[in-house]
Structure formats: C-alpha cells, structure tokens
Image (spheres, rainbow, N blue to C red):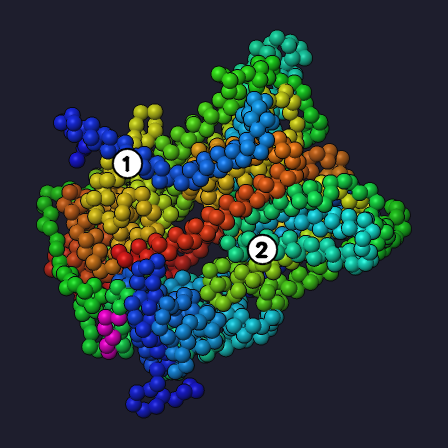
C-alpha cells in the first residue's frame, strides 16, 4: 500500500542471509538464505526436522541465530526479539494459532498490538470497533464478543489472521495453515490470501500438503537437513519433484496391493450404523487381509465413523460385527475388547505419552495381556514383546528407554502402531496414518500395514491423502455429508477418481 | 418467536455472568431472604455490619489469591507473608525505633510484603516452577524466619500509631435491635476491591494476567513480558497480603506470629466458589466478593441456627464441593452438546 | 526369538545374564532421582553425625527417627500416588485423624462395658480404622472419577468435611484410649528396629510393587502422563482414579493406625503441619506434581532425609521454626536444580531429533 511495487524486480520485503543455527553441536540450519517479495506467497517446504520451524522461530525473533542477518525493507537485523519482529511488520500465525481461549475475539485481535505499543491501559470501547474494522475489511463474519474457545477451528484461524493484520503486517508467516480446515474453508482462506497479496503483503506458507503448495504459492523454497536445496517458481515444479527435493530420494508411490483370498471371511461388518448429526446409515465390510480406505472432506463424517467404531462416539443404532459376532460399542474398552484398535489422527495428544519411554508407550494398550500369576506384570513377556516390535518396526532410537518426545514424527507413529500390534487386534483403524510423517517413513509405514493385512488383520485407513489411499487400499469408501456415497474398487482406485468423488 | 426466545436466552446468559456470578448472587439472595424469614435477628443492621466486619480480611486475602489464580497459579504463602509483614511492623514500632504514624506503618508492611512476594515471583517466573510447590516452600521459610529471627512472642498491645484505629468505627447507629458498628477498615477493603477490579478490566497489566492464565506460551509469543508480569503480580499479591495482615492485627488489637497461617485453603475455597477457575484465565472481582460473602453469611447463619461452630468448616467444604461439582457436571454436558452441534453444522 | 527357551544351556545362561544386566541398567537409569535422594540422605546424615555425634548418633535419636518416620512416610507415599495420576490428595491427614478418632472412640466405648473384650477386639478395631480410610478414599474417588472434579478442589472440600466431622465429634478435645496391643506394637522392636518402621517398609514395598510391577500401577502412571492418550489406549480412567483414591484413603487409614500406635491419643488437629510436609516430601522424592513420574523408593528416602534433618536440628538445639526454613530451602533448591538440568536437556534432545 505504502510501497507501490516498482516495475521489474521489486525490492524484497524480507531477506534472510546465511542463517546458521546450532543446537548442542548439531547444525539445525547451515547457512539458509531466502527472500520474500511484496505480494507474493512463498512456500517453505521440507520434511520434519529439516529446519523449517527453526527458521521461522528465528525470523519471528523467538530464537537467535548463531550468525547471519535478517533484512526487513533493506534494514539489517542480526537478531530480534518478538516485539521487534512485530514492530517490523512480521507476524507469525502458528499452527495452534496461539490465541487466548478465555478472551473475546476483539481482545485477541487488539491485544498484541497494544502490547507492542507499550500501552498501559486497555480501552474496551476502542478495542471492539478496531477489531470490527479489520474483520469488515477482510469481508469476514466474526462475532467480536464471542470467546475464542467457543469458535470453530476455521474461525479461530481467521481471528489469528485478523490479529496479524492489526499492526499493518507486511510479512505474514503461516505454519501449516490448512491442516485443520475443511476444503471449503481452505477455499475461503485462499480468497483472503489473494486479498492480502493484492495489498502488497508477502506471505510465507509452511506446508506439507504438496498439492496446496502448488495451488497457492508463486515460489517454493525447499529445505533439506538445514540447507536450502532449491528455490524456484511454483510453475517449474510438480508434486513429484517437490517430494524428491524434500527427501533427496526418488519416490515410489505406485500401487502395491496384494490379492486377497476370495474365501477370506469378513472380519468387520457394519450394518446401518447411524449417529444423528454425524453420519447416516453407514454399512460396509472389511475382510481379513483387506485394507479399506475411508475418505471424504474434513467434517464429512469420516472421523466420526472411525470414532464410533472405537467407542469414542457410540453409534445410536445399527449393528457392528467382529468376526461374525455382534458387538456393543459403548466405550473404548468395549471396542478394544472386541478386537478393534485405533491410531488417532492427533498423535501427540491422543496417541502418545510423550515424556514416557518407548517401552511404556508400546505396552500401554496390552498390559492386561501380559499378566503373570498374582496379577503382576510378566516382565519377561513384556520385554520380549517390546524388543520384537522395536526391531520389527525399525524404530530409530538409541534404546527402548528413550522418551518418545525425542523421536521424529515417523518414528513416533511407529510407536503408536506398535502399541496396537502388541495387542494383535482383529481390526486396526488408522486416522491420517502419515500426517506429519516424513516422506521416507511414509512408505515404510504403508509397508507395515500391508504386511499386517497379509497376516490376516482387517485394516481401515481414514485419510484425505489420495496418493496414500491409492498406494495401499484394496477398496476406498467415499463419505459425503455423513453417507457412504461411493465404493471404489480395483482399477477405479486412482488419485483423480478419488479427488473427483470427494469434491463432487 | 425464536428471536424473542434467543433474546431472552441472551439476557439470561448476561445475568448469569461469565463466571456464574449471577447464580452466586441468587444463592446469596435466597440464603439471606431464607435466613431473614427463619430468624428475624438475621435481617438487622448489627448482623449486616458484623458480617461485613468479618469479611474484611478474608476479602483482601481472597483478592490476592484471585490474581494468582487468574494467572494460572495457586498461592499458599500469602498468609505467611501477611503475618510476617504485619508482625515485623508491629515489632519495629513497638521497639520504639521508628514511628511514622499509621501511614508509615502500612508503608513499611507494604515494602516487606512486596519484597517477600518478589521472592515468590522470581522463583516462579524465572525457573518456571509449579506455583503450589514454590509457595509451599516459601511459606515454610517465611514462617520460620519470622519466628526464629523476628520474634515468637504474642504482643497484647499494639503501638499507639496503630491501636487508635482499632476502635474507630466508620458508622455507628443505634437501632431497636442494638447498636451497630461498622469498622473503619472497610474503607481500605472497598478501595482495594474497586482498584483491583479496575486493574483487571482496564489495564494492560490486568489483561496480560488473563492472557497468561489463558495460555502462557501464546502470551510469550504475543510479546507479553511474562516473567516481568508474573514478578509484579506476586509483588502486588505480597503487598495485598501485608495490608490484610495489618488490618487483621489492628482489628484484633494484638499481634501474634502464629496466627493466620493454616487458613489459606479456606480463602482459596472462597475464591473458587466465586467462579475463578483453578486452571487459570477465569475469575472476577465480583465473583470473589460474592464468594467471600457467601462463606461469611453461611457461617453466620449456622451460628444463628444454633449449629455448633465445629460444623462450619464442614459446611464450607460441602459448599465448595457442591459448587465445583455443579460446574464440573455442566461443563461436561455442554462439551457433549458442542460436539454434536459441530457435527451438524458441517453436514447441513 | 525366545532367548530364554534356547536349547543350548550355555546360551541360555548367557541370555539370562544378559537380560538381568539390561534390567539392572534400566533400573539404574530410571531411578535417577532416587539415586540423588540416596546421596542426600547420606550427606544429611554425615553432616549431623559430624556436627553433633554424641547426640545425633545416640541410640535414642536413631530410634526416634525410625519411630517418627513411618506415619509421615505412609502419608507421603499416598500423596505420591495421587500425584502420579496428576492429582493431589489434601484430605489424607484428615482421613488419618478420623480413622484414629474412630478407633479410639470405639475402644473406649467397648472398654467402658468390658475392658477385656475391648482388648480382644483389637484386630476388629484396627480393621474399622482401615475401613474408615477406605471410605474416605471412596468419597474422594467418586468426586474425582465420577463427577470429574479437579482433585485439588475435591480433596480440599473433603479435607474440610472430614476435619469438620472430627472436630464436631471430639468437640475439639484430645481423646485418650487405645488397645494395649496396639500401643505395645508401637513400642516393640524387631531385631532392634522399631516395628512401626518395619511396617512402613512393608507398606512401601507393597506400594512399590503395585506401582512398578502391576498393570494397575502402569495404568496409573500413564493416566498421569497423558490422560487423553490413556483413554485412547483403552485405560479406564474412572477405574484407575477410583482405585488410586481408594488406595490413598486406605494408606490414610494405615497412617491413622500408626498415629494411635505411637501415642494412645487421637485428636482432630493432630499432624496439621503434615498436609504440606508430605507434599514437600513427595516432590523432594522425585514425584512430578503434574503426573506420570514417581518412585516409592525416592519418597521413602525423602521421608528419611527430612526426619534426619529434623532430628539433626533438634540435636543441634535448633528450633522447629529453623527446621521449617530448612524444609522450604531444600524443596526450592531441589526444584530449581531439577529445572535447570531439565532445561539443558531438551537442547540435546532437540539436537538428536535434528540429526536423525
């Protein structure tokens, strides 16, 4: 706005020069450089642990670099604190939004700028109109008096965006902005991003969803092991080449599906399962050895179906049979007793005990199965189970006593898997099995699923990652508005087909 | 029709208040009306004044505890600070070393209380330690230092700079039920209440405390100087405790280093009853005032109803459990409703 | 795969030794805080033994430490259990007093008619004391697990209620009267060690086995480490919390028996300072107040440390108030050191994550 972009190459808003950052002798960033032009969306991509989050923390002033400079409008900083960064017009919208759940939308929107300007008094009467002005300016509908804890995820994100704009932000960094949004909400977000671009704001998107990276951004910068591997216009990249730059490997995402014995019996039969407000009249079967995908938009009911089968949201009506026997699913305990296991989508809070050891995590669901006489734990049996799974799933850790917090996303997910494999469930459901998992671990996890299915387990994969479903599923159920509207089988299971059916 | 109903619901929600202050006020009102019908002695000026008098010190302590609870902590050292600051001041004045009048005495207690609070704040903010554990430790230290190095003697007469206030009343009224006195120390209590309400609602410091209690990490990211805010917070709490201690000793016309400590949990109970969330981020001055008065009125009612005073403690315990239990059960109910509501919103 | 079932005997022995060794190493690894406590006990003991050997090392003093530790130690272990689930139990001392008062009243009532019968009914009286503890724990358990009230508030409420009942029951007076058998147990020794201390060790070992070696113990630990993940792992949090508070209540009842065995008196305000003292001990013993981490061994050592410091202070003619200062300083120092070490650690961990 204040800086009309000159013709030709405009001056960059933000330049990052040779940033080096080490943690305890290990290099997190080994001389990373990038620049951001006004009115562009730059996507920062890379596997977990490549240094993306460290770089963002340095730009936002939360961490200090060991060397290197940051230039904002050509003005150099060797390091900043959070307030400096905000004053220079740099705003970060974290994946968790960092909002205050107990305060209203208006307060959340104005508080940061009031702090940055070192104000002493809080004026409620000017706060509301100020927040309202920003909301109107972006053409949004948000209730300024609502408490943030009562908002939907999408509205929370919009609140965070409004907050970023209060201080005339020129650079907005968004960390995994689309993870928790439905497709329509992502569409709405992209419209707002376009409006911001038109004002000359520069945006950095940190995302692992490769297709979105290509839709929204003008340029893509890819980090690998703390180094800037490539920065190039989005038009010159495709999903495959981005993935290859991220991993440094040529990827195999082709379909590997073992044939199932036609005689193979059904292990899970769901008939007319119904939960008003979540899904309606859901029926399907999973046979022994079969991997069935369940896909649909976020909010379509796919997660609710899985949570019902796991007893989290007990279904209101319908029957569920495991190995031909009807089961009641009133609680998680019922589901587990029936032989159903569930790898939840929110791994960090629902799946793992982060501070506890790998061993404790692996045994967490099967303690009662490892009883010795007198009801104590059979130590030898426990150790045997843990060592077997640790070796089989190839968890990369010094030993089984290492805390799970020290593991990467892929290894942490293997630990969650191991927790269920220790119980040998008849049916294993996985919700977003490779979300936040680096591309290398992803194919190994899919291999583990294929092997378990070959051993006779029935597997249900709930996912919105079409290539992943194509890679491992025999059949894919498409859920729309709470109903199973399509079942793709055989050659019909392909990426374009799934995307078309999901969005229809 | 539906608009009218939602308007009514909206009005009811407003009346209920963000922390159930409305519900609390209603209970208090019902209790007062009920007691007045059951026992006419209750609804008299002397009773009202005596309840107000007995609420002064708990209220001041409760306001300090409220601040800490909003910020997401819990403080069990305030009583030790109160008695430390007040007793030390009395000792110094009693020794004749200094005499700067009543104002000077309060100023001295404030400085001592502020310094002790700063120790809490430093340990909590600098090392990010659990507040309960730190204040548990400092409580022992403050009490031990007081009794070892300052004195352990009961002082029956306050120095003249303070004792003259002990018998000063703000209002003296003669009614047909007897003479009613309102102690002058209600004035600092009321002033403190109003100032704190203003600080919490209208200053950035106050809003920062709510923000820290809501999400400390988000507060840090938003540029709030969490360490500094927390240290100041505990300094202020220490000063409020000191005022409470001074008023306690002035109104009791004596000073003993063994008093107050041990009653911390009763004060915390009143604050929680007043709608403050033990998890931080939630609570109001109005709710705390109501909570403190509810406890005082119940104690008073029990005495008038002839219930042995031994049962008062148990009554406050029951009240606390009922209050928190209702909160817990309704929170669970609304959580479930929100889930179904969300699901419907998407499928429509 | 099954190393233990290997046919070759030599290999089998090797495998056995191997697994024992890793087991030992693992244990040493896990009990870092317990090792530190062991050091602290030795240091505390050495300091007072050096400063005032004549008094501190006397048989009477050591006997005193051994007699005064058990009641505090048992309550501290109960506190540790509650903290292991991420909760706290402020009502323990009130439960113990209520249990002691019940036993004393019951004994006096029966003895008024038939003193011999009252002595004979000694086991029943103790059982009733334990049942009082169990009931107190059951109320806490219901409030926490069924109604979902935060433990600190639930037990704050029940603490007031149990204490109120005790005050109203006794009229605030101290009750005298206890079975002679109980008193003689309190004064007896087993091989020179006071029986009370032996009982304490037995209780500690039993709770230690429950925590480390049973599914329930691991469930309690995991529940405290992450309640949501515990739920998604099929751990029934209601049952786990209920069991925990039943256990803490019963331990409170045991503490009541110990109270009465040590002194044949019971009152509502006995051990008022214990409420906060046992939190100090639990935290000092390596219990994480946020849940998920605790060892019984550490808590036992912390109990001994504080009792050694207490009696050492007495030996040095320091006052109870100075002991209170020492308690606070030790607690805060340990927390600060822990925190400084912990903050250094994630850096190394983060580095490990980056390198992998």
Dot 2: chain letter: B
Query: Tag 1, which secondary structure?
Result: helix
Magenta residues, dominant SS class:
strand
- The quadrant of the rendering that contains the C terminus of chain B is bottom left
Q: Using the image, determine if residue A182 lies above or below residue B68.
A: below
Q: Using the image, determine if residue B104 lies above or below residue A358.
A: below
Q: Residues within 10 Å of mark 1 (few under 14, many from 20)?
A: few
Query: Tag 2, which secondary structure?
Result: helix
Q: Quadrant of residue A465?
A: bottom left
Q: Residues within 10 Å of mark 2 (few under 14, many from 20)?
A: many
Residue A296 place in picture, x, y as percent: 27, 60
Check disc 1 and report the residue beneath it: C22
Q: Residue at x 60, y 63 (%)?
A: B206
Residue A325 place in picture, x, y as percent: 24, 37
Q: Residue at x 59, y 41 (%)?
A: C326
Q: Residue at x 39, y 82 (%)?
A: A74
Choose between A503 and C87: the one closer to the eye.
C87
Q: Which residues are magenta?
A: A228-233
Q: Using the image, determine if residue A325 lies above or below residue B203.
A: above
Check disc 2 and report the residue beneath it: B121
Residue C178 place in picture, x, y as percent: 62, 18
Q: Quadrant of residue B313?
A: top right
Task: Tell me if C303 is positioned left or right of C20 in this view.
Answer: right
Q: Residue at x 44, y 33 (%)?
A: C297
């Amino acid at each position: 706005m204040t800086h009309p972009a000159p013709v030709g190459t405009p001056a960059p808003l933000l330049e990052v020069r040779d940033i080096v950052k080490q943690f305890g002798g290990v290099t997190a960033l080994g001389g990373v450089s990038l620049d951001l032009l006004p009115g562009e969306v730059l996507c920062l991509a890379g596997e977990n642990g490549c240094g993306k989050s460290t770089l963002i923390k340095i730009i936002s002033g939360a961490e200090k670099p060991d060397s290197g400079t940051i230039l904002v409008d050509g003005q150099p900083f060797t390091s900043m604190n959070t307030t400096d960064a905000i004053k220079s017009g740099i705003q970060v919208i974290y994946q968790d939004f960092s909002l205050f759940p107990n305060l209203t939308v208006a307060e959340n929107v104005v508080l940061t700028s009031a702090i940055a300007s070192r104000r002493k008094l809080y004026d409620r009467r000017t706060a509301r109109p100020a927040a309202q002005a920003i909301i109107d300016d972006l053409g949004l509908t948000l209730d300024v008096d609502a408490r943030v804890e009562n908002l939907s995820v999408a509205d929370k994100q919009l609140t965070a965006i409004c907050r970023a704009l209060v201080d005339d932000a020129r650079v907005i960094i968004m960390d995994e902005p689309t993870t928790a949004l439905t497709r329509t909400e992502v569409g709405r977000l992209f419209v707002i991003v376009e409006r911001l671009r038109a004002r000359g704001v520069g945006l950095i998107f940190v995302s692992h969803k490769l297709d979105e990276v290509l839709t929204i951004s003008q340029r893509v910068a890819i980090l690998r092991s703390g180094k800037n591997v490539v920065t190039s216009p989005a038009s010159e990249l495709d999903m495959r080449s981005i993935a290859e730059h991220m991993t440094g490997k040529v990827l195999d995402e082709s379909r590997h599906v073992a044939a199932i014995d036609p005689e193979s019996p059904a292990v899970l039969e769901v008939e007319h399962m119904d939960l008003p407000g979540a899904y309606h009249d859901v029926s399907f079967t999973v046979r022994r050895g079969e991997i069935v995908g369940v896909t649909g938009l976020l909010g379509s009911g796919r997660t609710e179906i899985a949570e019902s089968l796991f007893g989290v949201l007990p279904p209101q009506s319908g029957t569920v049979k495991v190995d031909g026997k009807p089961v009641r699913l009133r609680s998680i305990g019922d589901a587990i007793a029936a032989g159903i296991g569930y790898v939840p989508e929110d791994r960090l809070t629902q799946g793992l005990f982060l501070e506890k050891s790998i061993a404790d995590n692996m045994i967490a669901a099967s303690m009662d199965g490892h009883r010795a006489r007198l009801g104590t734990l059979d130590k030898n049996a426990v150790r045997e189970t843990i060592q077997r799974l640790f070796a089989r799933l190839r968890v990369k850790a010094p030993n089984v006593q290492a805390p799970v917090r020290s593991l990467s996303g892929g290894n942490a997910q293997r630990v969650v898997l191991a927790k269920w494999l220790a119980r040998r469930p008849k049916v294993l459901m996985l919700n977003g099995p490779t979300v936040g998992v680096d591309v290398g671990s992803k194919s190994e996890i899919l291999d583990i699923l294929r092997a378990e299915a070959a051993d006779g387990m029935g597997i249900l994969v709930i996912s919105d990652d079409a290539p992943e479903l194509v890679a491992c599923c025999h059949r894919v159920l498409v859920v729309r508005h709470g109903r199973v509207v399509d079942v793709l089988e055989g050659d019909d299971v392909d990426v374009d087909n799934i995307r078309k059916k999901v969005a229809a | 029709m539906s608009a009218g109903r939602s308007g009514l619901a909206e009005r009811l929600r407003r009346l209920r208040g963000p922390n159930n202050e409305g519900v609390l006020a209603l209970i208090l009102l019902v209790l007062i009306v009920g007691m007045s019908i059951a026992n006419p002695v209750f609804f008299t000026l002397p009773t009202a004044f005596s309840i107000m008098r007995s609420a002064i010190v708990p209220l001041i302590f409760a306001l300090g505890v409220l601040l800490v609870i909003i910020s997401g902590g819990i403080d069990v050292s305030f009583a030790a600070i109160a008695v430390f600051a007040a007793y030390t001041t009395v000792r110094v004045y009693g020794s004749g070393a200094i005499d700067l009048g009543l104002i000077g005495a309060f100023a001295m207690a404030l400085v001592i209380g502020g310094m002790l609070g700063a120790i809490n704040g430093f340990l909590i903010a600098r090392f990010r330690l659990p507040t309960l554990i730190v204040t548990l430790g400092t409580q022992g230290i403050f009490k031990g230092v007081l009794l070892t190095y300052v004195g352990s003697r009961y002082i029956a007469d306050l120095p003249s700079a303070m004792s003259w206030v002990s018998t000063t009343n703000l209002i003296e009224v003669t009614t047909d039920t007897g003479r009613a006195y309102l102690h002058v120390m209600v004035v600092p209590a009321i002033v403190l209440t109003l100032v704190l309400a203003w600080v919490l609602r209208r200053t950035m410091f106050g809003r920062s405390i709510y923000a820290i209690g809501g999400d400390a990490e988000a507060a840090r990211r938003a540029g709030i100087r969490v360490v500094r805010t927390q240290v100041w917070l505990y300094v202020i709490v220490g000063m409020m405790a000191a005022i409470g201690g001074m008023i306690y000793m002035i109104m009791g016309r004596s000073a003993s280093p063994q008093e107050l400590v041990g009653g911390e949990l009763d004060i915390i109970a009143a604050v929680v009853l007043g709608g403050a969330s033990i998890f931080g981020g939630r609570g109001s001055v109005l709710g705390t005032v109501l909570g403190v008065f509810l406890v005082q009125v119940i104690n008073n009612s029990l005495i008038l109803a002839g219930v042995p005073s031994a049962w008062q403690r148990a009554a406050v315990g029951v009240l606390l459990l009922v209050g928190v239990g209702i909160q817990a059960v309704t929170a669970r109910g609304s959580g479930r409703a929100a889930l179904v509501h969300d699901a419907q919103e998407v499928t429509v | 795969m099954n190393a233990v079932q290997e046919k070759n005997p030599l290999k089998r022995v090797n495998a056995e030794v191997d697994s024992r060794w890793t087991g030992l190493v693992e244990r040493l690894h896990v009990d870092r805080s317990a090792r530190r406590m062991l050091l602290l006990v030795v240091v505390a003991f050495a300091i007072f033994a050096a400063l005032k050997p004549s008094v501190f090392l006397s048989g009477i003093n050591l006997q005193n430490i051994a007699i005064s530790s058990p009641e505090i130690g048992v309550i501290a272990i109960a506190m540790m259990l509650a903290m292991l689930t991420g909760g706290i139990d402020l009502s323990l001392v009130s439960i113990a007093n209520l249990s002691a008062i019940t036993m004393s009243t019951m004994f006096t009532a029966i003895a008024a008619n038939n003193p011999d019968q009252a002595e004979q009914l000694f086991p029943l009286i103790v059982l009733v004391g334990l049942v009082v503890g169990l009931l107190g724990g059951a109320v806490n358990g219901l409030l926490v697990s069924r109604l979902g009230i935060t433990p600190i508030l639930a037990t704050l409420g029940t603490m007031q209620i149990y204490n109120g009942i005790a005050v109203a029951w006794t009229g605030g007076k101290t009750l005298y009267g206890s079975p002679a058998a109980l008193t003689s147990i309190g004064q007896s020794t087993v091989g020179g060690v006071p029986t009370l201390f032996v009982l304490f060790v037995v209780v500690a070992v039993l709770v230690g086995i429950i925590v480390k070696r049973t599914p329930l113990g691991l469930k309690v630990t995991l529940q405290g480490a992450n309640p949501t993940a515990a739920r998604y792992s099929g751990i029934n949090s209601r049952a786990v919390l209920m069991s925990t508070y039943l256990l803490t209540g019963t331990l409170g009842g045991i503490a009541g028996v110990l109270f009465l065995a040590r002194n044949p008196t019971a009152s509502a305000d006995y051990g008022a300072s214990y409420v906060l003292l046992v939190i100090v001990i639990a935290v000092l013993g390596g219990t994480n107040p946020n849940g998920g981490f605790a060892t019984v061994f550490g808590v036992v050592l912390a109990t001994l440390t504080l009792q050694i410091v207490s009696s050492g202070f007495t030996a040095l003619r320091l006052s109870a108030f100075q002991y209170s200062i020492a308690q606070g300083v030790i607690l805060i120092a340990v927390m600060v050191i822990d925190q400084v070490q912990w903050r250094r650690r994630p850096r190394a961990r983060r580095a490990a994550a980056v390198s992998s």
